[in-house]
Every structure is written in C-alpha cells, then in structure tokens.
Image: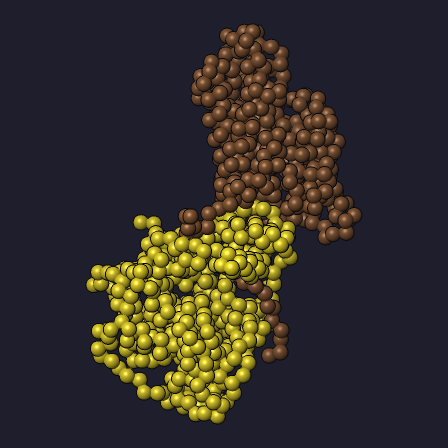
Amino acid sequence: MNQKYIVSAAPHLKEKQMTVSSVMWQVVLALMPALAMAVFFYGFKSLALTVYGVFAAIVTEYAIQKLRKIPVSISDGSAVVTGILVAFNLNVASPWWLPVIGSVFAIAIGKQIFGGLGHNLFNPALLGRAFLLASWPSLVTANWTATKPAFSFMFNSINGLNPASIPAAAPAAFTGATPLAAMKTARELSDSNPELAQQLVDRLASVDTISNIFLGNIGGVIGEVSALALLIGAAFLAYRYIISWRIPISYIFTVFILTYAFGGMHGLFSASILLPVFHIFSGGLILGAFFMATDMVTSPVTRKGMLIFGIGAGILTTVIRLWGGYPEGVSYSILLMNCCVPLIDKWSAPKPFGEVKK
Amino acid sequence: MGLKTFPGGVHSHDNKGYSRNAAIETMPLPPKVYVHLSQHIGAPAKPVVKVGEEVLTGQLIAEPGGFVSIPMHAPITGKVSRIDSFAHPAGTTGTVIEITGNGEDNWVELTDDQNYENLPADEMKKRIAGAGICGMGGAGFPTHVKLSPPADKPIDTVILNGVECEPYLTADYRVILEQTDDVIKGLKLLMKIVGAKQGIIGIEANKPDCIKKMRQALAKEKNIRVDALKLKYPQGAEKQLIYACTKRKVPNKGGLPMAVGVVVQNVGTAVAVYEAIRYQKPLIERVITVSGKIVKNPKNLKARIGTLYSELLEYCGGTTEDVYKVISGGPMMGFAISTLDTPMTKGSSGLLLFNKKEAEKDREYTCLRCGLCVEVCPMNIAPSLIVSGVRYNDWEQAEKYGVMDCMKCGSCAYICPAQIKLIQWIDIGKLEVGKRMRNRQQSAKA
C-alpha cells in the first residue's frame, strides 16, 4: 500500500448538521411563518419588499467580495438573512427602494466593511434600519396600514383594537399608528386627562387587543406582525440548537418585570398584569429578542454574557418605551448592547470545571 | 431515575454497530512485533536485551526508566532483530525493539497464586509494576503510580471506566461482556490496594447488556455498584466520569482524582491487574477494535502488543474502498497516522479507517461567535475566545479563558459550524502558555 493518508488534528468526526450555511438557511426557514402572516394581513406587497431586500443584500455581498477578490459566499445564506431582516423592519407602505437601500447599507457598511461575516460589531440589519430611520424618518415611522385580513371573521383592526371600541374622545394619534405608538399617546395624556389616559391604556392592555397583537392583526412593520408566527420559528431554532434561550428569555423577562413595575401611571406596580404582556407581544420585541439579539456574531459567547446582554437590552428597551422619545426601543437597545459585547465577554469568562477558589 | 452525567458535552453518532456484535477473536501470532519503549506517560523504558538475543514470550526486554515508567516484555517468542526508530501510533516516531518470531509461543513461567487476594498491597503494586501495566484507555499513565497516592490523600472510591464514549470503539464493551468476572476481580484488587470502601463501574446507557450482566454478577456485592451513565461524549473523560458517579469535582489547574479521594481505571486495565497479580502475567496483549464503514469485517481482536496495524487490517479482510485516513484510537481524540505500518501499543484501543468522504473536512470559516463551543465544553472554558487569543498571539487572553484546563476532548471542534480546528489552535496555545507559566514560576523563584 503506497497510498498517502490524510493526517490532521483530532477530532476526526464532525457534526454534519452544523455548518455556517445550514445554520443560516435554517434561520431563513424560521422566518417564513412570520412572512406568511405578513402576506396574510398586509398583502403580497410585504413579500415583494422582502424579495427586494434579499436581492439587494445578495448583489451587494457579491459585488463587494468580487471587488475584494475574496471567495464569494452568497450561498451561505447569511446575506439572505440580513436582507429579510431589513425588510422585516419596514412597514408595508414603504416604497420599493427603501429595503434596497437598507440592505445595501446593511451589507456594505454593516458587515463587509468590517471584514465580512463574523467580524461585524453591529447587527447589520438593525444598522440598516437605523440608517433608514435617520435618513427617511417619515417613511419608516409613518404610513401604517390598517390590516386587511383575508377572512371575514376577523375584523379590520386598528392597533389590535376593534374600531367600534375606541372611545370617541381619543386623539387622532391614538388610532393612526402601532399599538406601541398608541400606548405612548395614551401615556402622554396622563397629565391633561388622566381619566381618558387610563381608559385608553386599559383598552390597549386588554385580552382582546393582546390576542390580536399576538396573532398579528395590527399595524406594524412586516416582520413583527405576528408574535405567534415568530415564536413558531424561534421554537424551531431553539430545538435545532441554533439559538440559545438565554438572550431572548432574559431580554423578555426583563421587559416584563420593568414594564410591570414602572408601566403604571400611579407609581410602582400600579399597572395591570396585562400591561407587561402587552409590551412583550407588541412592537419588535419578539422579533428582536429571538432573531436579532441572538445574532451569533454580535452577541456574547459565554452563558453569563448572554444573560447580561439580554438583561441590558431589556432595561434599555423599557427605558426608551416608557420615558424615551420613540415609542419603540428594541432596535436601538440591541445596537447599544452590541457595542458592549467585547466587554461583556471579557467580564463573563466562565469558571472552569473544578475551579480552585483562591 | 435519570441517568447520571456531567454538564456540557455533545451527542454524537456512536457508530458502534460495525463491531459491537463481534466477539473478541484472538489474532494469530504476527511474524514480527515492534515494541515501543515509550508506550506510556513518563520516562521511556530502557532495553535490557541486545540484537540477536533469543527471547521467550513474556520475557523482560526493557526495564522502567524511572518511577513514572513501565517495563516492556516480549510479546512473542523469537529473536531480537533490531532496535531502531519506528512509526509511533501517536503520529510521531520512537525507538522500538523489533522481535522476529519463530512461530512458537513459549512463555516464561507464569504462577497461579491461589492466595493472590490476600497479598499485601505493596506486593500487589510490585506485581502490577513488574507486569508493565499502564492505563489502557488511551492516555497510558503507569498504573502502579496511580495506585500510590501520598499518605495525606486517602482514597475511598475506585471507579472503573467502562464508558467507552469514543464512537466506533467496542473493545471495552466486549471485555465487560466476555470477561465480566475478571473485571470484577480486578476491581476488588484495586480497591484492596488503595484501601477504598466503595467501587463503582461506570457504563454508558448504550450498553444495556453490559449493565445488566455486570449488575447480575455483582448482586451479592454490597460495596460495588454499577452506574448507568447518559450517552454523551465525553462521558468517559476522567473528571467527567468522577463527577457523574460521585458529584465530586476534581480541582482544575493540574488537580488529580486523588484530591477528591478517587482512583479511576479502565476496565481493560482491571483485567490486566488481575492477571498480573494472580499469574504475574506481563501486559503483552490487549483487545483492540478494528472498525470503519469501509472495513470488510470489523472485529474486536485480542492482539499482541507491537503487532502492525496493517496486519490487523489484513486479518479483518482489508477494506472495500480506498483508505483516506487511518486513525489510531477513537475518532474524537485519536491520532491520524501516515502509515499502516505502525505497531499497536498498550494504549491502542482502536484502529479506524475512513474513506474519502469521511476523511475530508470543509473549509474553515471565520468564527461566527455562536457560542456553541462554550455551551458544549465539559471543562466549562471558552474555546472560541482561547482560539482568538492564540490566533493573535494574545497569550494572556488564551490563559484567562482556560487554555491549560482544556483536556482536548474535541467537543468544540465537533460542533463548530464554522469548522474551526479548535483543538489544533488550543494545542499551540498550550505549548506557548505552558512555557510562559514555567518561565514565570522560575523568575518568581529567582
């Protein structure tokens, strides 16, 4: 036998299910239920916007890798994930070029400029969204479309509210936007008209409204429409060991506790228990907690670090939602926590098995 | 009741089906054997024979090179034909004593000591040392040294490692099944030597027949129990096994099992200990699994130490496809070797052959920072952060995240989606950080 054998370091076995592309394509798959729900509630334009975003992301990645004369890696699916998430952060009334510019920015500035997959500091999709929000604020945060579900047993809701149940005295801002914006409007009334404010908050934090929000019968961006669909995708990823429970659960739990503690208008813990539930399912929290905060590249690698990351993002989100200028704070919270990741990893080195106490 | 286990680890395909049901076969005597002087941890043995000398099977051919060392014995009858450098199953080379057999198998005289159970501990240890026994699970630490803890480290528990968590390997499985009584006799002797009150045999749950048979054989024993352990790699790693069976944590930074009152021995080693104490039989043969998808007849062979892997494979009918990788040991921690003309040693638990598809690895990606390596690490260190330290010569970072605590089980590299060769990087880190730590100690002394 003169044949030469391959010599390499152990281990000689590899889990074949775990590769970069299988991870990325499974994330894509996990986002499909949410996309289906967006099509169901907002129509096919949501699909079209997503396709534009994905297409732009792939083309940008290809072009930059060609320019840099490095292997083209568009087939690994990571650009597809970014493209989907950029589009998922836009409302369905957006013009076609908005996801395109968002994706180009996300891939070029958010990812490739740092050196490509694995090197970026910030979640590329969220950076894309932040760029769009700064450049075309009115396009990103206005023009919310009332949902038009395909089946007649579901009413056309406004912010998850049955239009008939909205008090006539409610200000116009209450009915125009997303549930979180409505909540913000209601809270702003707490000085001038505390009674109405309380009434509106109670309408929002009600079982009816929350179940509409949970299913997706609300105005919002494409990706956050249905908490249920997102959770199905997230459960799949957790089952496949692609996301760990630590970041999403600590994130959501922190928001729950803090909105319960500070969300009421009459001091600590004066809110109904439904208010934190409302906060969890409305806005981008489910999308952000399960699909963006868990972005492998831009989150800590240690177990303790993941918890710190989740708790930190939860605190920031609550602060922005309750006291900040924006109705929603998920994307900025995650971006801010992204900056802290190297530090968090440094502080949260795991204790080796059998660590000797000094 | 849930199965006992440890935190971390990976669930790999055990691939034991190829050779699981092959009863141990005794391999015919090879025409030549190549006995390495270094088959163990510690000083190499020193030859006491000269080229041209006739030797009997079991005759001493090399004496220990120190306390942490073992002697070597002639595995076959014949003539010492060469003392020279030769391929070592760890992928390196080393000095071997080559013996050309004369076709006979004339043993040195063995005893059958009826009173073997009541010998003093020192005499037992002497016989173990004299038989040249080292750990047969792979690491090869001299057994008599492991059985000689200092007086301030009393041992209360002996654990026999019957886990065999490496995929493919079935040698220990067959030993437990076919030599159940010898394993138990060996365990009792080990307990007597170190004065341990309890004995535990740890067996992974994928060997229910072993667990059942062992429990039946131990029905009357009060202080020996069988622990069924969860099927998870690396369940058979020493510290993880101790934790699973006793919930005791061996201290890190070079801590030994004796620090928590435990001695661990492999089941094969227990059999060798029994044979050494009762018959004064030197360790010149062992059971080795020859397996792989492409091996025609995968087998568990009882073969003489020093037999070439090529002969083992030939005895198993060769392969059905071209061989692209040869692994000495298990697929997770074993060595890929460059030639089949490598002799087996006392630590050789397996010979695996991979085809092209099994041998090839995908290209390495950049670290995705997914954290799966941290998640699965049984030593609870941060492999990806160690590797990024090593990659950029940041040795402080590598040390801080625990490079020296790594036991190189390979779980991280097994799971890594980016196909990063973590163990290779960690090996580099261990060398450099180890050097720095020694320098620091020296300058602290000065």
> Foreground residue, B191 or B182?
B191
Q: Is residue A68 left or right of residue A11?
A: right
Q: Is residue B211 at all visible to an observer of this figure? A: no
Residue plotted at (63% across, 16% down): A176
Q: Is residue A195 shown above or below A318?
A: above
Q: Is residue B315 shown above or below A316?
A: below
* Count of marks, rendered view: 0
Residue B303 x %, y %: 43, 78
Q: Is residue A309 at all visible to an observer of this figure? A: yes
Q: Quadrant location of the N terminus of chain A?
A: bottom right
- Quadrant hosting residue A149: top right
Residue B397 x %, y %: 57, 50
- Quadrant hosting residue A133: top right
Residue B225 x %, y %: 27, 59
Residue A159 x %, y %: 57, 20
Image colour for chain B is yellow
Q: Is residue A308 left or right of residue B59?
A: right
> Foreground residue, A132 or A254?
A254
> Foreground residue, B189 or B179?
B189
Q: Is residue A243 left or right of residue B181?
A: right
Which residue lies most toward the right here? Answer: A67
Chain displayed in brown: A
> Foreground residue, A346 or B22?
A346
Residue plotted at (73% across, 40% down): A108
